[in-house]
Amino acid sequence: MIWVLIPSLTALTIPLVSAQVTATGPNGPTNPEAPSFLPVGSLVDQSASFSRLLSLNGLDDFCLFAPPEAGPDSLIGNVEAIAVAYCTKPRNAARIIPDGAITAAHFIRTPTYVQIYGFWDGTKVNIPSGDAGGELDPHGAENLGNPMGGNVTSNVPTGSDVFYEEWMSFISYDQFCLRICTAQTNNVTTALQCEHELDIMGCQFVMAIDDFYSANNSFTSCDGDPAPPPGLYPQADGSTSTFRQRYTGTYVDGAGSTGMFTVGQTVTPSAPAYYPAKSNCVTYSSISNGVNTADYSVTAAPQLLVSGSTGAVSSGPSTSSFSSRATGSVSSSSTASASPSRFTSEPTPSTSASTTASTASSGAAAQSSTGAASMTRDLANEGFLLGSLVGGIGVLVGAILSN
């Protein structure tokens, strides 16, 4: 099957609904019962750990998913269901992200989610060089998650570790981003704020990061306003337009004949509805894991960055970092790249289109982005169908079969 990125906008009014915030599903069978730092004297299991528990607590205390084994077949699209956790600190019985692998990281704490994004050498965690990656989330083909048994926690909102229901992450050989949705508002549920079906649009678009491609070789921690839910565009009349990826597939009717159906639209928005403001930013020179990689032994309690300094933490359950912050300033770039995502299963050419960094009007959202219309993705390695399209597909196929 082939994905063709020719999305557009259709009118949608967001209902005033509530959704689940904390996790309801079971913790994965290969995960520790609760997130915690490894005790001093223990060893990180760098080659055989199958923990799939991510934590996102701060700039230098987070985890990401990556392949369990190295090799040319360990493309993210191939291993989504079996990816394992790698962390910046020795925690969660997971593997460790080697020092120096992460060249940039930017942590944002908002009232409704926590988010980390940046650049890295993903080959250090078994991602093949050049793999443009893919999207991981708690749903997947069997609604068991990608990866199956994957769970996430954060201690930022409450000061203690909480398992959360909705999250999304994009991973490639050179980029990463992770958002955990921790609260909802009257009209934005955690499912909307952690939208998981724009899986070829990448970090900058989905997570509304205005300075993404200029943010390498730096480390910051900021407060922020919530971004618009991915793919949603508020309109002047109070309604909301939504953007969906175009999808073409096949079905078999009652007579055994195979037909084709297409859902989605034909216009690619050039940017999210707007880029949210950031404040109280603190800049750091680097991050480190504190592990002796000669034998992967934990020789001291982890040190966490807090307001421009480091502080030791206990080896028990983690507590909230960034509890106090030095006041800082954030500079806003006047333009931001709105080029299509690099998260496709094969490299595709793209053309950058500049848009205002602070806002992107709904009119701009209706404009086609050069190069995006031809972007394709081979889903042979994905093995799943977009959940948001199931309802539309059912209606379409039902109408076909009734004729």
Image (cartoon, rainbow, N blue to C red):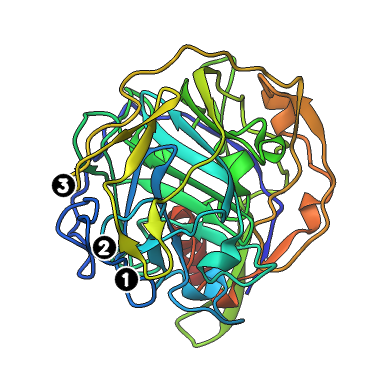
In the image, is residue 359 above or below residue 116?
above
User: Could you tell whether 347 is left or right of 382 in the image?
Assistant: right
Residue 40 visible in image: yes
Task: Name the residue nearer the viewer: 40 or 370.
Answer: 40
Q: Earlier in the sequence, mark 3 or mark 1?
A: 1
In which quarter of the view is residue 258 placed? bottom right
Query: Label 3 sits on what residue type?
Result: Gly
Are circles 3 and 1 on residues that touch, CB within 8 Å? Answer: no
Are circles 1 and 2 on residues that touch, CB within 8 Å? Answer: yes
User: Residue 45, labelled with which disc?
Assistant: 1
Task: Name the residue nearer the viewer: 104 or 128.
Answer: 104
User: Residue 316, labelled with which disc?
Assistant: 3
In which quarter of the view is residue 22 placed? top left
Task: Name the residue nearer the viewer: 273 or 391.
Answer: 273
Identify which residue is drawn at 24% across, 51% down: 37
Query: Label 2 sits on what residue type?
Result: Ala
Q: Position of residue 377 (x, y in %)?
A: 67, 66
Identify which residue is drawn at 17% across, 53% down: 34
User: Residue 93, labelled with which disc?
Assistant: 2
